[in-house]
Amino acid sequence: MDAELLDRAAKLADKSAGLTSPHPNFGCLISAAGGRGGKAGVVGEGFLYAQGTKCAELQAVETAGELARGGTAYLNMEPGDCYGDHTPVSSLIQAGISRVVVGMRHPLQHLRGEAIRSLRSEGVQVDVLGEDLQSKIFEGALKSCLNVNAPLLYRSAFHVPFSVFKYAMTLDGKIATSSGHASWVSSKQSRVRVFELRGRSDVVIVGGNTVRRDDPRLTARHGGGHVPVRIVMSQTLNLPEEANLWNTSDAYTIVATQRGARKDIQEKLARKGVEVVEFDFLDPREFMEYCYDRGYLQVLWECGGGLSAPAISSGIIHKIYAFVAPKIIGGVNAPSPVGELGMVHMSQALNLIDREVELIGPDLLISGYLQPIPDLSPMIPSADTTLALDPTVSPYDADIIFFYKTWDPYGALSNFSPHPLQMPDGNGDCTTWSTLEHYYQANKFWRVNNPLAKEFIQQIKYAKSPEEAARLGRKLQRQHPDVVRDDWEDAKIDVMYEALKCKFSTYPHLNAMLRSTAGSVLVEASPHDLFWGGGRDGEGLNYLGRLLMKLRSEILEETAVTAGVK
C-alpha cells in the first residue's frame, strides 16, 4: 500500500504541469488510520498548482478533516519552506498525522532534510524511500517520484536547466524534404503532444534556420495557462525582418546572438518588443548557464541538426523525444535531426536509458534519457555533518541577498508569495487579494471609467496563481493601453509600497524575516524586469529591493523606539 499510494502522490503532483510556469511538483495523499475512506483508505489529497498558491499538504488535510487524525501522509518529495511560514509541516502536525512517507529528500541544499527533522522532532514517524524503506517493491514508486521532479534534480545537480530535445522524423530519418519542406512530418496527434511538452517548459529554443525555413509560432496552443518564452539562437543574426516569433503580444521572445552582430537587426527587433541578448561567444553550454541564472527550470529544444549537434556534444541535453512517422521521403541532402557529432565507430553511439515507446496515432514516440536522473542523496551526510560541527555556518549569509524564485531561501520577500492581503478594491471597499501580485496588477485599471476596467480587475483578482495574474495584467495593459489608469507610471511605486506594508504588518514571521536581513542589500534577481528587478548584469533599477529596504528601515526604527519606551 505504501508503494501504491506514493506512486499516486507522484502522479497527483504532475497535474499542475502545463498550467503555469514549471515549479517543484508536490503531491500529497492522506490515508486514514484503519483504512477508512474508500480505496486504499485515501481521505484527502492535494497538489501544488504554482508558486504562490496553497501547498499540497494543507489542501490534503483540509479535505480529510478529522479523518486525517492518526493517518499517514504520502509525499512525493520532502516539503519545502519557501515562504518562511512552515505551513506544509505545521498543517500535517496540527491535523494529527502520525506517519509521513516521503519519496525523496528535497534536492535543494538549504531545504534538504529540514522538514524531515521538523516532523520527527514533533514525534511524527517519517519513512524515506531508500533510507527507511528499502525494497524492490518501492522501485516503481521511487522512479515516479524522481521523474515528476526530474527538472529540479538536473538543475540542482548540474546548474543548468533540464533540457529536452524533441524532433519529428520520417522512417528513413529525415526531418524535411531536400527542398526544406517539413509540414507535416508527424500526425496531428503527435503535434498535440508537442503542445503539451511546450506547456511544461519555461523556454522553447530554435535556431536561425528553423525561423527562416518554417516561420514557427512555438505557442502551447492549449487555450490558456502557461506560455513558454521563445528563444532564437543565432550567431550571425541572419534572420528575417518579419516573422511570427517577432509578434510578442501573447508570448515573450528572446534572440541570443554574438556581440556586435548586425546592430540594425537588433534595433528593429527591439522596437518590436523582442529582447536581444549578446554573448562574447554564443555556444549551447554558456547559454544554458545564462538560462539557469534567469531561473528557468525546463527547456525544450525544437531546433534542427545544426544546433542540436553542438547542444548534445556539450552535454546539456538530458532527454530525447523522437516522433517517428511511418513515411519515407528519401533524399541525399534531406536534413536529419542531429548534425555532425564526430563519431566514427558505432561503439561511440549515445544510448538512451529508461526508454519508453508509445504509439501516438500512426506515429511512434521513443523517449529516454541521455543522462541518468541525478541522485543527490549522497550529499546529505556532509550537509548534516557540517551543521553538527558548527550550527552557525550557513552558505546563504551574504552582504547581498538575492530573491526571485520559489526555491530561493528568501522567497517570502517576493510579491508572488502565497500570503493573502486585505486591501481596498477599485470601489474603496476592503477585500481579500490572493497575493500581493494580484492586487498590484489589478491596480492598473483602478478608477477608470470604462466597463472593461471592472472586467479586467475581476479577471486578475480570480487568476489561479500570481504568475497568471502577472501575465494577464501585462497582457491586458499591452492590448488595452486606453483602459490603464492615466497616472499608473507615477502611482505604481506607491501602490507596491502600500501593499508591502500591509503584507509585512499582517504576517509576523515575514516581518521577522525582513528584519533578519538588516545590514544586507536586497536585490530582486529578475534578469528581465529592469524596473522592479536587478537585471542580468545589475543594470536593473531594483525598485522592489529598494522598497523592501526602505520598509525594513522603518520597521527597525519603530522597533527601536518601542524598545526605548519600554
Image: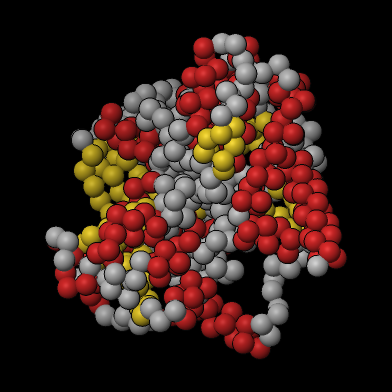
Residue drawn 53% across the image and 35% down it: 431
- Front residue of this view, candidates 339 and 495: 495
Q: Quadrant of the C terminus?
A: bottom right
Q: Nearer the viewer, residue 310 or 242?
A: 242
Q: Residue furthest left?
A: 38
Looking at the image, which residue is at 54% across and 77% down? 379
Would you say residue 369 is visible in this rendering? no
Q: Is residue 100 above or below residue 483?
A: below
Picture quadrant where residue 212 is located? top right
x 29%, y 54%: residue: 63
Q: Position of residue 534 (x, y in %)?
A: 75, 44
Q: Indicate the colouring scheme.
A: secondary structure
User: How far from the left and from the top, in percent, is residue 60?
Assistant: 33, 57
Which quadrant does the N terminus fall into?
Answer: bottom left
Question: Which of 287 and 156 lies nearest the eye of the viewer?
Answer: 156
- Examine the rendering and report whether any part of residue 446 can be seen: yes
Looking at the picture, does residue 289 appear above or below residue 30? above
Q: Is residue 153 above or below residue 191?
A: below
Please give the name of the residue rendered at 74% of the width and 34% of the height, measured from the top-left corner: 494
Q: Most extreme residue toward the bottom, as rendered? A: 389
Q: Position of residue 197 (x, y in %)?
A: 39, 41
* In-front residue for pair 443/190: 443
Question: For this view, does 290 lie left or right of residue 262?
Answer: left
Task: Find residue 105 and report its horizontal and vertical position in percent.
Answer: 45, 71
